[in-house]
Image (cartoon, rainbow, N blue to C red):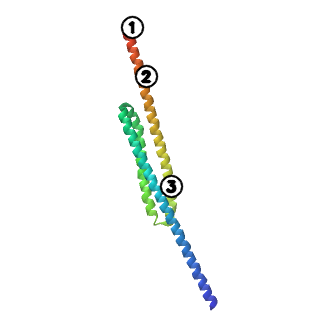
Amino acid sequence: MSDVLRQLARVREARKLGAMARAQKQAALVAQAAAQNAAAQQGLQQTVSARSAHDAAVEQAVREDARSAVALLCGANAARLALDRAIVNAHVESTQTGTALAAEEVAQARAQRHVARANAKCEAVDRAEQRVVAAQRRAAEWQEEDAALEAQLARQLVSQKITA
């Protein structure tokens, strides 16, 4: 009888240890999901900040030269659309990560996919910013070319008037 009682005590102890291990695993999953949610929120904030900086650059370009702004806006609009999509996607990811706190193991796999998507989106934002900088550079080059052509045309007109 005492062997049976000892075995029962071992089984109870094993069950307690198993329950404690499951509770620790769930707590770790919840903490990981919370950290991923914070990372998604930070990514969302960075994307919103990038969009604000982009909007300010577009406004400055419009004020400086309307003609070059038209060419710049073509690229900037595409970049802004990409930023808008990134904001929406980051918001969706943030919402999904918040929901994932309740679904421990499913949330862990989903959060890993969201981190990969967020990295891709950050790279897309970087590429969009590089395109905006390149468009601004091209617009400045076009302005310089226009000024040189206008000066050359003016010299030609002056020389034609002198010869006439």
Give the number of the mark in front: 3 or 1.
1
On the image, numbered disc 1 is attached to which residue?
163
**What is the quadrant of the N terminus in the image?**
bottom right
- Whether residue 129 sits left or right of residue 67 in the image: it is right
Residue drawn at the location 44% of the way across and 59% of the way down: 96
User: Looking at the image, is 131 positioned above or below residue 29?
Assistant: above
View extreme (top): residue: 164
The residue identified by callout 3 is: 115
Q: Amino acid at mark 1?
A: Thr
First of labels 3, 1 by sequence position: 3
In the image, residue 4 sits, relative to residue 115, either above or below, namely below
Return the residue nearer the eye: 97 or 152.
Answer: 152
Residue type, numbered disc 2: Ala
Mark 2 or mark 3, which has the lower sequence index?
3
Q: Which mark is residue 148?
A: 2
Say what secondary structure mark 2 lies in. helix
Badge 3 marks a residue whose secondary structure is: helix
Separation of disc 2 and disc 3 at Cα?
A: 49 Å
SS class, disc 1:
helix
Q: Amino acid at mark 3?
A: Val
| Horizontal side, residue 28 vs residue 96: left or right | right
Q: Are marks 3 and 1 in contact (CB under 8 Å)?
A: no
The numbered mark, 1 or 2, whose residue comes first in the sequence reads: 2
Whole-percent x, y for residue 46 in the image: 44, 50
Q: CA distance from mark 3 to mark 1?
A: 71 Å
Instruction: Assign the C terminus to one quadrant of the image.
Output: top left
How crowded pointer 2 is (Cα within 10 Å; few <14, some 14-19, many 20+) is rated as few
Q: Nearer the viewer, mark 2 or mark 3?
A: 2
Q: Is residue 136 left or right of residue 25?
A: left
